[in-house]
Amino acid sequence: MSILIYTESEGGKLKKTAFELASYASAIATQQGSSVTAVAINANDAEELGNYGVHKVLTVSDDSLNNFSAKKYASIIQQTAEKESASLVIVGSGSNDKFLAPILSAKLNAALVPNVVELPESISPLKVKRTAFTNKAFAMTEVDTEKAIIALSKNSFGLKENSTAVTSESFSPSIPEDASSVTSTDKVSGKVAIADAEIVVSGGRGLKGPENWNLIENLAEVLGAATACSKPVSDMGWRPHSEHVGQTGKPVASNLYIAVGISGAIQHLAGVNSSKVKVVINNDADAPFFKAADYGIVGDAFEVVPKLTEKLKEFKANNA
Amino acid sequence: MKILVCISHVPDTTSKINFTDGDTKFDTNGVQFVINPNDEFGLTRAMWFKEKQGASVTIVNVGGPETEPTLRKALAIGADEAIRINATPTDGFFVAKELAKVVSEGNYDLVIAGRESIDYNGGMVPGMLATFTDANFVNMCIGLEIEGTSATAIREIDGGKETISTNLPLVVGCQKGIVEEKDLRIPNMRGIMMARKKQLTVLEPSTSESHTKIASFEKPAAKGAVKLVDKDNLDELISLLHNEAKVI
Ligand SMILES: Cc1cc2nc3c(=O)[nH]c(=O)nc-3n(C[C@H](O)[C@H](O)[C@H](O)COP(=O)(O)OP(=O)(O)OC[C@H]3O[C@@H](n4cnc5c(N)ncnc54)[C@H](O)[C@@H]3O)c2cc1C
Ligand SMILES: Nc1ncnc2c1ncn2[C@@H]1O[C@H](COP(=O)(O)O)[C@@H](O)[C@H]1O
């Protein structure tokens, strides 16, 4: 059995999730006595994957691939999977992974198991645990096809260093035409994206209005965190929709999630529950979110958050 | 323009999730079913195309007879007709294969599906369907305009959005943003009366092939009690986050 991982990069550099996929694949390969190949598109640092157990990297470099195209990328991964006779392909859970994975599944006739959170329970047949009902449950999924694709949930496995001798090979796949093309990209620069964030600071209706969001932003800045919000906050236009997290918004799987003035409705919790550590700041001791939290402060956000921000600044300065 | 909107019938977001038959089946007891929220946004956008650009809107579901109230609700919102493929939706691959047949036979120009269904969160039906029918595909679609056979779609990406220029036939996996929450429609009496008379065609499935099955379900382990920290002792919180949780 050979394992292929698709490692995403941005601006020529691998994303952190690439190393998590490598760690995960390497753990499977060690159990199975097989090896891990990575395919990286327009990445200049792909050899670093050797630090996380990857044996071989196939690097694809082509300027026509600078803009993401799900169709082209899926075709490239398909070609590498066929070339390497990979029976298991592992991808991540970012928005580009979610765009290309179903296309790849249809092209390879390989079952796609999304939202995977653990190592497989068995390899043949492949049995692996994934989340379902937006984190309200897990489903042990059994695959009936020869080939399979696992889409690993972010932050579910972590990074495991494992230095390996890695060989690098450049690969020139045939690149299909794509009738779709990106005409403009609008990325907020200097801000951490929720999908990539280790820490997320989120605000709810308890903040009373958009003019108070400096509380959330200042706290996020000290922590190098992304900012997020509850659904009503984005529906009222206090914050952009891209910050809405929860069952019908973005999922959050950060190491630390700080919820300020959010009650903890079931739909909100479903989307943020897979964050490792949750801190809740709410002036109502009976707010349901306290039941789902690791740490809590019962208090007025307008008093607690600025103080916490100051104290964290001092802490950061002393621990730099 | 002929539009097909894929509707998945899912437990209401407030549902308590339980299982039966030795944790192998979802327990539907007491569960209220609704139109998948992402599909409701898509259906609303389809109604806009119908009203502003004269499109026809068909809705489709792969599911048993129990999904018909959900389909009637979508008809009451304003879809013209409904198709139900009479089968248990075993996995995303199976659903996409069945939908592909409907799309090819009906020559739809635009297929609107949701980014994911909130029950199994597969997020795979639209992408597979687009691939099986050789259509263009945009996922996480938060904006869509059509002119003739050209389409401009906005897609959410990690940390921003991008605009994509593409052509019909097109499949989109959409989410909130394609229309706003306030644009969602609640069926009125007239809509509900009219929906009763609209055509709902039931077709039998053409394949039985699926890629995966669920061996068992499990609920997350119960959470330990929250550690409350006094609001006047924030140093303690910082120390806990640093030394105990090791997240800062
Ligand atoms: C189909 C559907 C899907 C949904 N999807 C989502 C989703 O994806 N994400 C989501 O977030 N919601 C979702 N919701 C909405 C959800 O049900 C709740 O309405 C919402 O999460 C509440 O937002 P909130 O906590 O910001 O506001 P509220 O419930 O109004 O809570 C505000 C909180 O702030 C506290 N507070 C007030 N003043 C202060 C203060 N000075 N200091 C500290 N705390 C204070 C209050 O005690 C309260 O707990 C969905 C609902 C439906 C019906
Ligand atoms: N059984 C079904 N019948 C019709 N459409 C479906 C069905 N299941 C999923 N879909 C569509 O595909 C989208 C994504 O679903 P999924 O891939 O299951 O997460 C949904 O939002 C629907 O638009």
Image (spheres, rainbow, N blue to C red):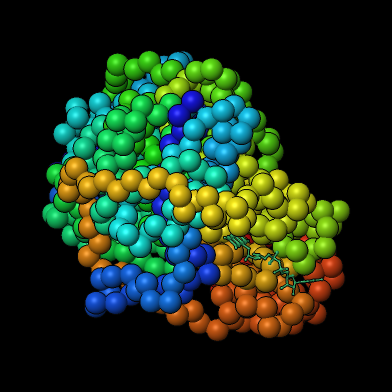
For the point 29% across and 30% down, which residue is it?
B105
What x and y, as percent, mark residue B229? 69, 81
Q: Can you tell which quarter of the image residue B171 is in?
A: top left
Asked if residue B130 lies left or right of residue B22, the reply is: right
Asked if residue A68 lies left or right of residue A50, the reply is: right
For the point 39% across and 39% down, which residue is it?
B126
Asked if residue B60 lies left or right of residue A268, the reply is: left
Q: Is residue A30 above or below residue A204?
A: above
Asked if residue A263 lies left or right of residue A147, the reply is: right
Quadrant showing the C terminus of chain B: bottom right
Q: Nearer the viewer, residue B221 or A240?
A: A240
Q: Can you tell which quarter of the image residue B192 is in?
A: bottom right
What x and y, as percent, mark residue A157? 39, 57
Q: Nearer the viewer, residue B162 or B238?
A: B162
Q: Can you tell which quarter of the image residue A135 is in?
A: bottom left
What x and y, as percent, mark residue B80? 48, 41
Q: Nearer the viewer, residue B243 or B175?
A: B175
For the point 59% across and 27% down, which residue is it?
B53
Residue A81 visible to the viewer? yes
For the point 43% across and 42% down, which residue is it?
B81
Q: Is residue A316 above or below residue A34?
A: below
Q: Nearer the viewer, residue A88 or B180?
A: B180
Residue B170 visible to the viewer? no
What x and y, as percent, mark residue A196? 55, 47
The mark total stands at: 0
